[in-house]
Image: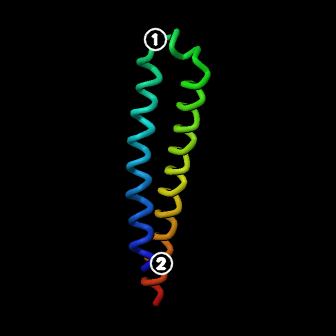
Amino acid sequence: MFMQIAIGAIGIGIVLMVGYLVIAQVKVALPTADLNDSELNDSLDSTQATVFAGFGLVAVGIIVLAAFGLINIFR
């Protein structure tokens, strides 16, 4: 069960990392006049903050998989 949770967390994290790359490219591609819009800037920042949570999911997933592997080795 823990292995499925870890693999799911890694999968969600990968999807969010791709989202981070897309948002970063959108932010770069927008003209500077559009970035002065505070609502747009706030939206992009909150989206990037959500994606950073995905990085945390990847880290947790890898830690759980490593722990699961160590438990099986010493069993």
Up-down relation of residue 34 to residue 52 (above or below): above
Whole-angstrom CA distance, mark 1 to mark 2, is: 50 Å
Q: Quadrant of the N terminus?
A: bottom left
Colour treatment of the image: rainbow
For residue 70, which numbered disc appears in the image? 2
* Discs 1/2, front: 1
Determine the residue positioned at 50% across, 70% down: 64
* Residue 43 x, y percent position in the rendering: 55, 32
- Give amino acid for label 1: Pro
Residue 5 lies in what quarter of the image? bottom left
Category of crowding for the residue at label 2, using alpha-carbon neighbours closer than 10 angstroms: few (below 14), some (14–19), many (at least 20): few
Between 21 and 31, the one nearer to me in the picture: 31
Considering every residue shown, the one lying at the far bottom of the view is 75
For residue 69, which numbered disc appears in the image? none
Determine the residue positioned at 41% across, 40% down: 19
For residue 31, which numbered disc appears in the image? 1
Considering every residue shown, the one lying at the far top of the view is 33
- Give amino acid for label 2: Leu
* Residue 38 x, y percent position in the rendering: 61, 21
Determine the residue positioned at 41% across, 55% down: 12
Circle nearer the N terminus (1, 2): 1
Determine the residue positioned at 57% across, 41% down: 49
* Residue 36 x, y percent position in the rendering: 58, 14
Element marked by disc 1: loop
Element marked by disc 2: helix
Category of crowding for the residue at label 1, using alpha-carbon neighbours closer than 10 angstroms: few (below 14), some (14–19), many (at least 20): few
59 to the left or right of 69:
right
Up-down relation of residue 28 to residue 11 (above or below): above
